Structures are given as structure tokens and as C-alpha cells.
């Protein structure tokens, strides 16, 4: 069904509600189809009309944080009608100074502008007496191309999108902050799969201040992707991102995964403070290869199958003991200040040397501390049916266990073994009472 939308300019003073800008929801050009081409019909136009119209398009194109671009595609005898050609012409403007029309709501596929041929037009600066300025009116009407709507309030009367004009006016040639905010609101975002089919196309296209939104569907990566500085990548709830062996990372851009979005697999690297998301990874090892000091690697709900060799100053955390399962062994060898927590580990957790390894809130087959470590702690760990916790530790650690209840709240399964190589019987006893079920074998 055809829908004609007119942007009408008349010189009547009128009071209405005030908006900083106004536009038609979900009605815009697609990024994949730009630059938007236009043709000019110079019949009835004043001399210099092409230059004036080009300048009007350039004004909008230069608005920052917006991706929309235009291309003068020449002249021709095109009129104000649906013909798959975006045209600007002189003719009957339905009683207005000028009018614009589009023929589809989303996306826009054609837009025309007509300037009223019975009026007097000028392209000079300042405009000729009693003439409408082509660039002034064209800039307003191109705002309608982009889907901005007229504003009629007195407070809006300096804006390009103010819906009234008069002869010799030129203030609409340049955009106000609100006009720019309007165009930025509509054309800041590049949508996948609407504007582009693939994430890499969108990421490669946008510039600082813009954002890429994966709105729906399944995006399967075919390359590593970097979200550039100043760019936001937003993954919306209906979208699935299949990493397919690749990663999405950023250093000074922004990655946001909304609740309900699906990551396959769901492995996220975040900063320690504020949990700022820095990367999505196809494996824990690939995330570890990128970690900075005190980064956290989050494993979402589900199963992950790999053996993990933890670095220093890194937290590996899951969604919970009953929702995240790691099928593999986890080793901390001569590492300092790292944690593992909130998951089930179908394998052994081994600590060998180092210091300050915290093992919290886990199910695991076995937890083994081989030797020569300092200040390692085990809290709230449930071992497998016949699993064990072995702590071959030095005196300082035994003291810490007894004084801080480092193994407090732990539960060892039936027939599990607990052994502690060093420490006094009393210390061992206190630690063991706090962690072991009565039927566990305490050595
Ligand atoms: Zn208008």
C-alpha cells in the first residue's frame, strides 16, 4: 500500500507541543543500501540548484556519529512519483513550499522531493528578495528523507526541522544540535542482519560513536573480530553468536551481551573491577591467552570440555555448581593469586607450588595440593563419591586453616579421603571436623 508522507512548509505561525526531535519509528534507509543515490530534475529550477541541493545533502552527511551517506547520481526528467528513482524536482507541492514522499515504511526504498514551481526560488547568498532559498528548503526536506518529522513548537523555530519557513530564510541550511541528535538517533546503529548479513561487514564499516547491534538470527564467525575504539557491539536477546573457533575482543570499544542472548560457547573475559566485558571466546585456553592481571573468565551455564592450565592473577568462575560443568582437569602450577569457583569440575584440581590459590564453591573429583605452596585455601568443595582432598602443606598454611577456617563449610563425600601431610594433630582435627562428613576417611 502506498503511503505518502508530506513534509509541508508554510509560513503560518503556529503553536504546538515541543520535542527536541521527532521521527518515525523503525522507518529508515538500510545501511547496506547506501550511499543513497539521488537524481535532480532541473526543469523549472533556478540556476545553481544542483550545487545548493548537493550542499544540503552534504550537511546531513557530515553530521557526526551517523553513517548515512548520499551520492548525486546525475540529472534526468524524473518527477514526484514512485519509479524506483530518488528524485528532486520542481512541480506542484500540494499547497506547500515543498513536499517529500516515501513509498514504503521499512526499509525506505524510494524518496522524492518536490519544490513548488509557482514560487520564486534563489540559490544566492543572501537569497534574492522574496525568494525561497533552495538549500534552506532542501536541507529541511532531506531531513524527511531520513525520517525526521516536522517540529511546530515556537521553541523549535531555529531548528532545521521546524515545519514553517518564509522567503529569504537561510537558517535551516545548518543543523542545530537537536537536528544532529535526531539523525544520530536513527542512523548511529548498524543492525545485523538488517543492514548487513554478517557481523564482520558491520564491524568493518562503522566509525567511532556508532554501534553495531546483532538483533536476531544466528551469526557464525569466520574470523576473529575486534570491536574498534569508540564502537559498541550489542548482542540482543533474540540473537545467537556461534564463535566457531574465533573470538570477539575489544580494548577500548564496548561489548554488551543482553540477557537472553545465546553465545556458543558462553566464555567471557571480564575485568576484575566493574566486570567490563573484554572478549567472547571459543575456548577457555583462548581466553586465558588474552588475560590481563586479575581478569575474570566466566563460563556460562552448560558444559565445557577441556583441560585448563590456569595463569596467575586470574579468576575462573562459573554460573553455579549445578549449572556450569567443566569436563577436564584444572591445574595451577607455580601460580599466584588465582581462583576457581562456582562450577562442577569433572576432573581433578591440582595445585603445585605457588601461593594464594583459592578454590571455592565447587564440585570436583579431587583437590590435590602437591607441595610447597603458601596460603592456598579450599572452601565449600564437594568431592566425588570416592574422591579426596590431599593437602601436602607447610606449617604456615596449617596455621591459616585453623585460624581462618579456610576449609570451612566443605563437604567430602561418603568414603572420601582427607589427608594432611604436616601440622599438629589438633590443627588437623579442627580443620577436618569442619569439612568432613563423619564417614569420610580422615588420615
Ligand atoms: Zn517538513
Image (tube, grey):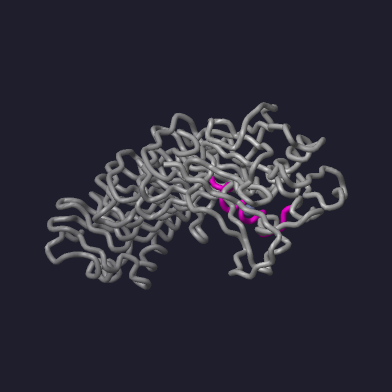
Q: In which quarter of the image is residue 14?
A: bottom right
Q: Relative to residue 78, is residue 143 depicted above or below?
A: below
Residue at horizontal 70 percent and vertical 55 percent from the top: 160
Whether residue 208 is visible: no
- Residue 167 picture location, percent across and down: 79, 54
Which quarter of the figure is the C terminus placed in?
bottom left
Residue at horizontal 78 percent and vertical 46 percent from the top: 120
359 horizontally vs 439: left or right: right
138 horizontally vs 99: left or right: right
- Residue 184 picture location, percent across and down: 61, 51
Q: What stretch is highlighted in magenta?
A: 175-189
Whether residue 393 is visible: yes
Q: Quadrant of residue 158?
A: bottom right
- Residue 269 picture location, percent across and down: 46, 48
Residue at horizontal 44 percent and vertical 38 percent from the top: 193
Tell which residue pokes out farthest to the bottom in this image: 403
- Residue 156 picture location, percent across and down: 68, 64
Main SS, magenta region, reads: helix
Q: How many marks?
A: 0
140 horizontally vs 123: left or right: left
Q: Relative to residue 337, is residue 438 depicted above or below?
A: below
180 horizontally vs 309: left or right: right
Q: Relative to residue 24, is residue 214 depicted above or below?
A: above
Q: Is 389 contained in the magenta span?
A: no
In this view, the residue in front, 315 or 378, is: 315
Which quarter of the figure is the N terminus placed in?
top left
Amino acid at each position: 500500500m502506498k503511503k505518502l508522507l508530506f513534509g509541508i512548509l508554510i509560513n503560518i505561525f503556529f503553536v504546538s507541543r515541543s520535542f527536541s526531535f521527532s521521527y518515525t519509528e523503525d522507518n529508515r534507509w538500510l545501511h547496506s543500501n547506501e550511499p543513497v543515490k539521488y537524481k535532480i530534475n532541473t526543469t523549472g529550477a533556478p540556476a545553481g540548484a544542483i550545487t545548493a541541493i548537493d550542499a544540503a545533502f552534504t550537511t546531513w552527511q557530515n553530521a557526526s556519529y551517523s553513517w548515512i551517506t548520499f551520492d548525486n547520481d546525475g540529472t534526468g526528467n524524473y518527477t514526484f512519483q514512485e519509479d524506483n528513482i530518488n528524485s528532486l524536482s520542481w512541480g506542484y507541492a500540494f499547497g506547500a513550499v515543498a513536499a517529500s514522499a516515501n513509498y514504503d515504511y521499512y526499509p525506505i526504498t524510494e524518496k522524492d522531493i518536490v519544490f513548488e514551481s509557482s514560487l520564486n526560488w534563489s540559490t544566492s547568498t543572501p537569497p534574492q528578495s522574496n525568494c525561497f532559498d533552495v538549500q534552506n528548503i532542501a536541507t529541511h526536506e532531506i531531513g524527511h528523507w531520513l525520517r525526521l518529522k516536522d517540529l511546530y513548537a515556537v521553541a523549535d523555530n531555529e531548528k532545521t526541522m521546524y515545519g514553517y519557513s518564509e522567503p529569504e530564510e537561510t537558517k535551516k541550511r545548518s543543523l542545530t544540535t537537536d537536528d544532529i541528535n535526531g539523525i544520530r538517533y536513527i542512523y548511529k546503529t548498524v543492525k545485523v542482519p538488517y543492514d548487513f548479513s554478517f557481523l564482520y561487514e558491520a564491524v568493518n564499516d562503522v566509525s567511532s560513536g556508532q554501534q553495531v547491534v546483532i538483533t536476531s538470527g544466528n551469526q557464525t564467525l569466520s574470523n576473529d573480530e575486534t570491536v574498534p575504539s569508540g564502537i559498541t557491539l550489542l548482542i540482543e536477546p533474540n540473537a545467537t553468536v556461534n564463535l566457531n573457533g574465533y573470538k570477539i575482543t575489544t580494548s577500548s570499544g564496548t561489548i554488551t551481551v543482553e540477557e537472553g542472548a545465546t553465545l556458543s560457547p558462553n566464555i567471557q573475559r571480564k575485568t576484575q573491577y566493574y566486570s567490563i566485558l573484554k572478549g567472547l571466546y571459543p575456548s577457555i585456553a583462548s581466553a586465558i591467552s588474552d588475560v590481563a592481571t586479575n581478569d575474570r573468565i566466566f563460563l556460562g551455564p552448560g558444559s565445557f570440555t577441556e583441560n585448563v592450565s590456569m595463569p596467575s592473577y586470574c579468576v575462573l568462575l562459573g554460573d553455579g555448581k549445578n549449572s556450569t560443568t567443566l569436563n577436564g582437569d584444572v591445574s595451577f602450577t607455580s601460580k599466584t593469586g588465582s581462583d576457581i569457583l562456582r562450577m562442577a569440575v569433572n576432573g581433578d584440581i591440582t595445585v603445585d607450588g605457588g601461593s594464594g590459590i583459592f578454590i571455592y564453591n565447587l564440585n570436583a573429583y579431587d583437590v590435590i595440593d602437591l607441595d610447597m605452596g603458601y596460603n592456598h585455601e579450599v572452601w565449600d568443595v564437594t568431592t566425588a563419591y570416592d574422591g579426596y582432598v590431599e593437602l601436602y602443606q607447610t606449617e604456615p598454611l596449617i596455621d591459616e586453616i585453623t585460624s581462618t577456617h579456610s576449609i570451612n563449610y566443605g563437604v567430602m563425600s561418603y568414603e572420601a579421603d582427607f589427608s594432611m601431610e604436616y601440622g599438629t594433630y589438633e590443627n588437623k582435627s579442627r580443620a577436618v571436623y569442619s569439612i568432613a562428613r563423619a564417614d569420610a576417611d580422615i588420615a
